[in-house]
Amino acid sequence: MTVTEETAPASHYDRIGGASSVKAAVELFYDKVLADPELAGYFADVDMVGQRRHLSLMLTVVLGGPNEYAGRGLAEAHQPLNIPVEHYVRVGGYLDATLRELGVPADILAAVQTVLGQVQDQVVASGNRSGA
């Protein structure tokens, strides 16, 4: 049997509703992050329209949607910010809470958590990593 678009399993991206769902998640996520006084400072001088667009494109890739991201890599964008692991974990918690609030299935939540674990060292400042 040949796998075709009709028989291929739906991507996580398609299962949650595609671009409109990713956009809704990003909006809700940044509402939470920007309301947190410990995290809001990271975004004080950031173009949030562009920031939301970048996260939408990255989250789309993480969820198996079309890869249209052409921005900076995670390490290049985050290492200069000297982010401690506690803040990384806090942001990950907001992403998880956002996805849960939007009814994302458990297997997709687990897949996102796996990716967060895989990219942590690219985001957290090298002097702030646990065990470093």
Image: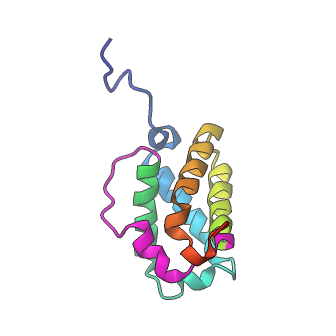
Can see residue 90? yes
Residue 78: horizontal and vertical position, in percent? Answer: 48, 75
Can see residue 125? no
Q: How has the structure been colored for display?
A: rainbow
Task: Work out whether 123 lies above or below 97.
Answer: below
* Residue that sits furthest to the bottom in the current view: 45
* Residue that sits furthest to the top in the current view: 1
Quadrant the N terminus occupies: top left
Residue depicted at 62% across the width and 52% down the height? 99
Task: Work out whether 52 lies above or below 109.
Answer: below
Residue 16: horizontal and vertical position, in percent? Answer: 52, 42
Residue depicted at 43% across the width and 81% down the height? 47
Please state the extent of the stretch shown in magenta in the rendering: 63-86
Task: Work out whether 100 lies above or below 28.
Answer: above
Residue 73: horizontal and vertical position, in percent? Answer: 38, 67
Residue depicted at 51% across the width and 59% down the height? 119
Residue 19: horizontal and vertical position, in percent? Answer: 42, 51
Magenta residue check for 92: no
Quadrant the C terminus occupies: bottom right
Q: Would you identify the image quadrant in which residue 3 lies?
A: top left
Residue closer to the observer: 49 or 132:
132
